[in-house]
Amino acid sequence: MATRKNDTVSKQTILALRDAIELLSGKWKFCILNHLRTNGVMRFKDLQEHAKGISPKVLSKELQELEDNLLITRTVNSTKPITVSYSLTEHALESYPVLESLIEFGQKHRDKIKDK
């Protein structure tokens, strides 16, 4: 019976890891989250300027996925012309330790490869 319990825990762990990786996967999601974390509320155009190399179509898609997954909020501002701004949700704050760990690992890895 212990094996069944371990199998269930293992399956749950694998599913949770798969969900997290899928949620944050892609070239731009961490970049977007990091810019919002650093700069607070940002407009679409500002995000595009900070995330050098991202096309408007890809940025729009990534922002939509982040919004669908409750990591950012999209606010339509009643300005002339109308502007849209994005900010992190409370739920997104839970990704900070993951982001920090990945940055730290990336820096160590880069240094290790450079020293090779």
Image: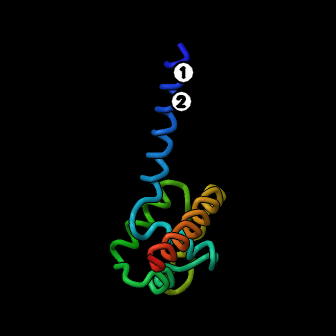
Q: Is residue 96 left or right of residue 76?
A: right
Instruction: Give the residue drawn at x 54%, y 69%.
Output: 33
Image coords of residue 38 (percent x, y): 63, 77
Distance (Cα) linking label 1 and label 2: 6 Å
Q: Is residue 56 above or below residue 29?
A: below
Instruction: Give the residue drawn at x 62%, y 55%.
Output: 91
Q: Residues within 10 Å of mark 1 (few under 14, many from 20)?
A: few
> Quadrant of the rendered structure where residue 73 is?
bottom right
Image coords of residue 23 (percent x, y): 46, 54
Can you name the residue that lies furthest to the top here? 1
Image coords of residue 63 (percent x, y): 45, 67
Q: Is residue 96 left or right of residue 66?
A: right
> Quadrant of the rendered structure where residue 92 is?
bottom right
Instruction: Give the residue drawn at x 56%, y 72%.
Output: 34
Instruction: Give the residue drawn at x 58%, y 59%.
Output: 98
State which quarter of the image contains the C terminus. Answer: bottom left
Circles 1 and 2: CB distance less than 8 Å? Answer: yes
Tell me the SS state at disc 2. helix
Q: Is residue 74 above or below residue 78?
A: above
Q: Residues within 10 Å of mark 2 (few under 14, many from 20)?
A: few
Identify the mark at residue 5; answer none if there is no mark: 1
Amino acid, disc 2: Val
Identify the mark at residue 56; answer none if there is no mark: none
Q: Is residue 93 left or right of residue 32?
A: right
Which residue is under mark 2? 9
Q: Is residue 32 above or below residue 89?
A: below
> Which of the two residues, 16 or 107, is positioned nearer the viewer here?
107
Image coords of residue 114 (percent x, y): 46, 79
Can you name the residue that lies furthest to the front here? 116
Amino acid, disc 1: Lys
Tell me the SS state at disc 1. helix
Q: How many marks?
A: 2
